[in-house]
Each structure stands twice: as structure tokens, then as C-alpha cells.
Amino acid sequence: MLKITFPSEGFVFNHTGYQTDALEIKIIEEANDRCQLKIETLMIEGIAVFLVMISCTDSIPVTLQMNEYAWMMNFTLQGQLTFQNAVSETQKGTFMAGSHQAWLNPGEENLAVNIIGNVKLFLVCLTGRLITKLRFAETVSPLQNSISSKSKWLPGRLTTPPMSDIINTISRYAENKTLHPIILQAKVLELAFIDLEQFQQKDKASSNTFVKPNDIQKLQLAKMLIGENLQTPCSLIELAHKVGLNDFKLKKGFKEIFGTTVFGYLLELRMEKAKTMLLSPGCTVSEVAHAIGYKNAHHFTVAFKKKFGYLPSKANRFLGFLLVTISITT
């Protein structure tokens, strides 16, 4: 169904099918002096998720071949890459960090991709059978319009905080080896509907947008800088100065583009990191609070409980109970 070829490096990744009755996880790794590749594949009936990490010393060509009717979503988490349809020169563009693209694969597609530096992708595929089963084409106008107009590609858009939350959740469960089939199915379908809903609202919102096109990259840089220093974050004015905006443009633009405030995004990242750390054996609440920038463990406990509905000291036990409950009901 999906074949990724690195002609200059001699690497080939070939995904040919789906596990229909249980979750299946596969990892492949390749490396030479110029390039390192890791692809983790998560599969369940009708769904495949590919976590792709590529590190290259130079720009290298890659070919993507798909031969099955499917709905595809690509979320670029790090770096950038350019692409062009091997047949149609009009279908080309750039995948940049913090953005995502969606397209309807008609059954036979060849993309010529150019990888630049370190790239991390979260690629999702929903098969034609699943699309039909869920009646996507009948109920979701962007997909219906894409099919009827034969314009397979939806315009690239920014990745929103809810989308990032879903991607981080799936990645975290996969890394911790606690991913359950129900979690994968539910989260991927939620991601697809958020993506399509965002596209439906895009035209309505674009006429009233505050953010100028040349400020988007600055706002994406601000978002990246927030994530790089959770323990001692910049003040709003310091952050604005670092990215070349005034504090008003930073506050208003960040809210418009990412759907949350600068502080709200910082809090979201802190809480997600805290939850991940608390799943590690032997990690205390005080250690976690300090690691994410809280001087007072009590203040952290209050914020954590407000976010997730349970105390940080109960995080490990709560997750274990949830997974046992899911297992019993399936």
C-alpha cells in the first residue's frame, strides 16, 4: 500500500497490509554515513500510523508510492520537505514544521520528495473501506468536494493544539508500550474529524484574520521556544523580542493561530510532560514539579488535578485502572 524509497541511500520501506483483529506495531531502522532512518508503524483495521524520523547531513531525494484508495494526513513535527506529484506539476508544495496536509489518494500516487536535514513526520492513513464504512464522503463536505472536483489535495494548514495533543498521546503510549487498539482508533478518528472541521471553518475565518503571512513563521518559532524551556520560560516580552514581534502581536497572533494563549500552551506542555514523567517508576511529585518549573509542589498538584481530574500521586494507578477497564470491555 505504501512504499518509501531512498534511491541514493539504498533504503526501502514497504508497507503492504493491515492487521484486522489486533494492534500491530513494527519498527524499522536504517543508517549509513549520510542518513539515519527510523519508521514506527502502528496498525489496526482500516488505520495505519507511521512515525517517521529522518536525519540527513545533506538534502536527499525520496519517492513515496501509494497504490490504494485512502485518505492521507501528514503532520510535519520537525524540519521541512518539498514534494511534487510525479505526474502533475501543479501538485507540489512544502511541508513545514507546525503544519499539516491532507489528501485523497485515488488508488495510484507517486510523490517525489526532497528531505532537508532532520525531519520528523506523523503520517496517517485511513483506508477506502473505512472511509466508506464511516460514510465520510456523505457527511463531511471537504472530503465530498474533494471527490467530486477531483482535486485530491486540501490546502496545507497549521497544526492546532488539539491535534498536537492527539499526536503526543499516541506517540507517548506507543513509546511506553501501553497503546491499546481502542485508544489508537479513537484518537486517529478524532484527529481526522478535527482536521476536516478545521478546513470547513478556514474560509469563514480567513477574511477576518489578524495575522500577516510573514508573521506566521515568527509565531511558530515562539511556539518552539516555549517547548524548549519549560523549567524557566521567557517572559512574554522576552519571548516577543526573541521572535521579532511586539507583545501585542505575539499575544493576539498566538491565540488566533494556535487556539490558545502563550501561557495556556506553556501550561499544556507542562502538564503533558508531568503526566509522562509520573508514569515512570520511582518519579516523585516533587521531582516532577521541579522539572517543569514549579517552585511549589502544592501549586503543581492543584494545576494537575484541575487539568486531568485526579491527583498526580494517583497518575500511575489511574492509567493502569483505565487500561484494565478497556481490556475487560473489549
Image: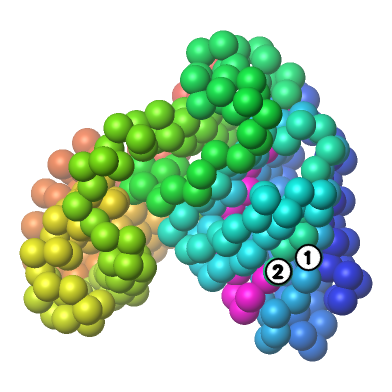
Secondary structure category for the residue under label 1: strand
Q: Which residue corresponds to mark 2?
A: 114
Report the side of 209 relative to 36 (left or right). Answer: left
- Is residue 308 part of the magenta span, yes or no? no
State the CA–CA distance, disc 2 to disc 1.
Answer: 6 Å
Q: Is there any visible trace of residue 287 in the rendered image?
A: no
Report the side of 131 relative to 4 (left or right). Answer: left
Q: Which mark is residue 62?
A: 1
Report the side of 102 relative to 21 (left or right). Answer: left
Q: Which mark is residue 38?
A: none
Q: Quadrant of residue 113?
A: bottom right
Secondary structure category for the residue under label 2: strand
Residue 273: x and y, percent?
A: 34, 59
**In the rendered structure, are the residues bearing label 2 and label 1 in contact, judged by CB atoms less than 8 Å apart?**
yes
Residue 2: x and y, percent?
A: 81, 45
Q: Is there any visible trace of residue 13 in the rendered image?
A: yes
Total labels: the figure holds 2
Q: Inspect the image, locate mark 2, and give the three-letter code of the amino acid beneath it.
A: Asn
Q: Is residue 132 above or below residue 179?
A: above
| Neighbour tally class for label 1: few under 14, some 14-19, many 20 plus, Cα within 10 Å | many
| Residue ID at (17%, 81%) | 241
| Neighbour tally class for label 2: few under 14, some 14-19, many 20 plus, Cα within 10 Å | some
Along the polypeptide, which appears first: circle 2 or circle 1?
1
Q: Nearer the viewer, residue 132 or 267?
A: 132
Q: Nearer the viewer, residue 261 or 23?
A: 261
| Residue ID at (17%, 65%) | 250
Q: Is residue 248 above or below residue 31?
A: above
The N terminus, quarter of image: top right
Q: Inspect the image, locate mark 1, and give the three-letter code of the amino acid beneath it.
A: Val
Q: Quadrant of residue 175?
A: bottom right
Give the magenta-colored segment's residue range. Answer: 115-127
| Residue ID at (14%, 50%) | 303
